[in-house]
Image (cartoon, rainbow, N blue to C red):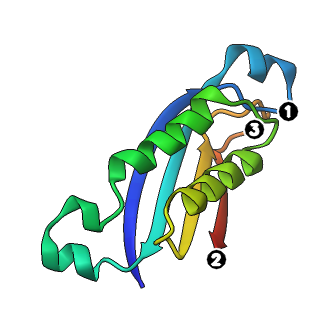
Amino acid sequence: MDKIYVNGMEFYGYHGALPEENVLGQRFFVDLVVETDLRKAGESDCLDDTINYAELYEICQGIVEEQQFALIEAVAEQIAQQILSSFSSVLQCTVKVTKPNPPIKGHYQSVAVEVVRGR
């Protein structure tokens, strides 16, 4: 299946299980893989025949910046469900949400979850 990638989207949100995360907020990164048939768009060279990347970005931005969840699992789930409900041509999407600075003692680069949802 053909794929659209939107990588490294960065947003500021208020997600976390700890009260201070919901008050102070922090950065989140989102990566998407959207599986759909791109043949028509490739042949027509017309934006109407594909999934507009800006619309994918806006869905992610709206969920990360305008909603609040305790878990990044819920953030990823909401993004996946919104993409599937917004675009009937999407067969499957993979959503990775990365939290680079969770309040965990220790040395690590980040924590992340990835969900794969389809029809």
Q: Return the disc, 1 or 2, that comes first in the chain's sequence.
A: 1
The location of residue 87, given as percent across then percent down, is 49, 62
Give the residue pinned by disc 3.
106
Say whether residue 57 is left or right of residue 29. Answer: left
Mark 2: which secondary structure?
A: loop
As helix, strand or loop, the secondary structure at mark 1 comes to loop
Spatial distance from mark 2 to mark 3, Cα to Cα?
39 Å
Type of amino acid under label 1 = Ala
Q: Residues within 10 Å of mark 3 (few under 14, many from 20)?
A: few
Dot 3 amino acid type: Gly
Dot 2 crowding, Cα within 10 Å, few <14, some 14–19, many 20+: few
Farthest residue toward the top? 23
Q: Are marks 1 and 2 in contact (CB under 8 Å)?
A: no
The spot of residue 25 in percent (x, y) is: 66, 21
Q: Is residue 43 above or below residue 12?
A: below
Residue linked to disc 2 = 119
Residue 108 image offset from top left, x and y in percent: 65, 44
In the rendered image, the vertical position of residue 84 relative to residue 112, given as above or below: below
Per the image, the residue denoted by label 1 is 17
